[in-house]
Amino acid sequence: MTLAIWLQSILDGLVIGATVSLGAIGITLTYAILRFANFAHGEFITWGGYFALAVLGAVAGSQDLKALLGGPFEPFSFGWPLIVATLASILAASALALILDAIYFRRLRRAKIAIASVIGAFGAALVLRNLVVLGYGADPEYFSREIQIAIRFGPGLRITPDQIALVFVTALLVVSLHLFLTRTQMGRAMRGVRENPDLASVSGIDVAAVIRATWVIGASLAAVAGVLIGLTIQLRPSIGFDLLLPLFAAAVLGGIGSIYGAVLGGLVIGVSESLAVMLIGPEYRAAISFGVLFLILLVRPQGILGARA
Amino acid sequence: MAEPALAVRALEAGYVRGVPILRGVGFDLAAGEILAILGPNGAGKSTLVRTIAGLVPRFAGEIRLAGASLADLPPHRVVAAGFAYVPQVANVFAELTVDENLALGGYTLKRGRAERAARVFELFPDLVAKRQAKAGRLSGGQRQMVAIGRALMVEPRVLALDEPSAGLAPIVVEQVFAMIRRVARSGVAVLVVEQNVRAALATADRALVLAEGVERLSGAAGDVAANAAIAEIYLGGAPAGASP
Ligand SMILES: Nc1ncnc2c1ncn2[C@@H]1O[C@H](COP(=O)(O)OP(=O)(O)OP(=O)(O)O)[C@@H](O)[C@H]1O
Ligand SMILES: [Mg+2]
């Protein structure tokens, strides 16, 4: 096999891994701050993608909106309509997360019975996924039917403009989140609550507000991941569900609670899946995340960037 | 007479409904005054300050700060009302820097956070060189300074310290008590829970001795120190005069 094939496979893996990272950040944040393993997190990705699809559909159906928002930014396949759709999707996914927490997850969390939380969240995921099937059917949906011409560079590598946008958006979000967590009072408060909720509350931090912020950030990143998947691959009602185990694998192998660990874990999962597909075939794609997780946890049980308990 | 900075009346509180740990505790604390809360392990000293801080459910009784009821406020509103609390353990954000700990201490402030932090660094000059260090990496004494500095960020009316001298070297203990006196002189009412009875009574104006959630002794620090009953309370709670 030539170097170019290897490099192409790694590149494809990084592109997939970037969306896994965005999802894994939400899982690691909700786990670290709420002590809640959210097995419904993948549905924020699915719903994020479909919220955006709904907005795109509304724009496409209205001559006025189409004229107002214009066509795609060449060479990308998307334009203002997708940006508007993404912002709307972020708001909708955040609202969904806040509502779910208020009516359901909060009770699961209060009960402090780990297995009830896991199964309860899993049940919520099934309901959410089936609601999407009810609304859109099980067939794949596309934001755009146009085939993108890949850009060639280096030793015969290919990447589409949309994939470049995906990597750029992910990097931008990770850097923004880093700045938010280290430079703003709310970001510091989130880190404070993660470490010691009682000390945070007696410092004057409204822990309930921090929990809401956590849901909004996690759901927003998931919504963007859903949009990026819709943009570069396709939407199916099962995308979030299918991503759930890779997301948890990424969060755990990176070190649960660590944002940068989640990012790194997402990229490791993406690249190893991609290499596995090339080397041994697509039927082992799902197993490989866990092979990697297993190997890394053998050496570092706390994950790559995790702190020892 | 002026309204006390903190007034607690007939307080009953505990972790499980129907199982009060505190069974009718009360005291008044004036601005600038230091009250030592003493008593053996498990007496309910921490529970008392945690109840005032809003962390432990109150079953009955009153808690008033400068006349306004604190009862049933969530902890972050109690801080905003002017009550700052330094817990007995895990009293700094170990993974955050000293600067970040102080910033979180001033979370309720709209402005003036930098000025308050500058005042904390005046009080604890040793911390200046450690501003960017994670609090978890500091020595025990420096960590206690961060914990107290964090609480002082809101310029509280009442400062409660739960065993501030625990685990510290004698010379550092002396510094901590000197700092407590300085804070009190600036007009803050101070509540200090202590195992170090001698040092606490030497520093405090008044003392309240708890055992099994009830008040056993209270009064001027000198009188409590001179009272023969105090040793017996620590040795097992037998009433004064009952032991040979
Ligand atoms: N989180 C909790 N849940 C249930 N009971 C508790 C809890 N914390 C303390 N208690 C109980 O409350 C009682 C009083 O404990 P508290 O910590 O207030 O005592 P203390 O006087 O501060 O003791 P020490 O000197 O050891 O710090 C004890 O019987 C203790 O077992
Ligand atoms: Mg105690």
Image (cartoon, grey):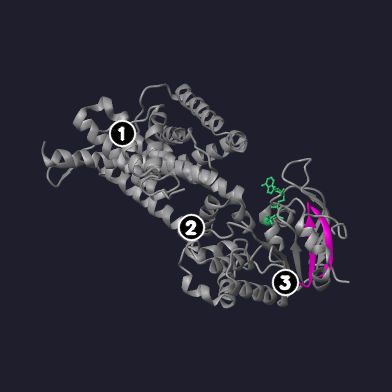
Q: Which amino acid type is shown beneath numbered disc 3?
A: Val
Q: Quadrant of residue A222?
A: top left
Q: Tell whether position A210 is magenta.
A: no
Question: With B136 as the anchor, is A20 left or right in this view?
Answer: left
Q: Which mark is residue B182?
A: none
**Which residues fall within the magenta stretch?**
B203-220
Side (left or right) of A125 relative to B109: left
| Displayed quadrant of residue A95 | top right
Residue count near mark 1 (Cα–Cα under 10 Å), binned few <14, some 14–19, many ≥20: some
Mark 3 burial class by Cα count in 10 Å: few <14, some 14-19, many 20+? many
Query: Which residue is at a point 12% across and 45% down the rendered structure image?
Result: A155
Mark-to-mark CA distance, 1 and 3 = 60 Å
Give SS at disc 1.
Answer: helix
SS assignment at label 2: loop
Q: Name the residue under label 1.
A: A291
Q: Which residue type carries mark 1?
A: Gly
State the residue in front, A133 or A31: A31
Residue sitting at x 54%, y 65%? B140
Chain assignment, label 3: B
Instruction: Classify 10 Å Cα crowding around label 2: few (below 14), some (14-19), many (20 and above).
Output: some
Q: Residue at label 3?
A: B188
Q: Where is residue B173 in the image (x, y as percent from the top left)?
A: 62, 71
Q: In which quarter of the image is residue A140?
A: top left
Asked whether B216 falls inside the magenta stretch, the response is yes
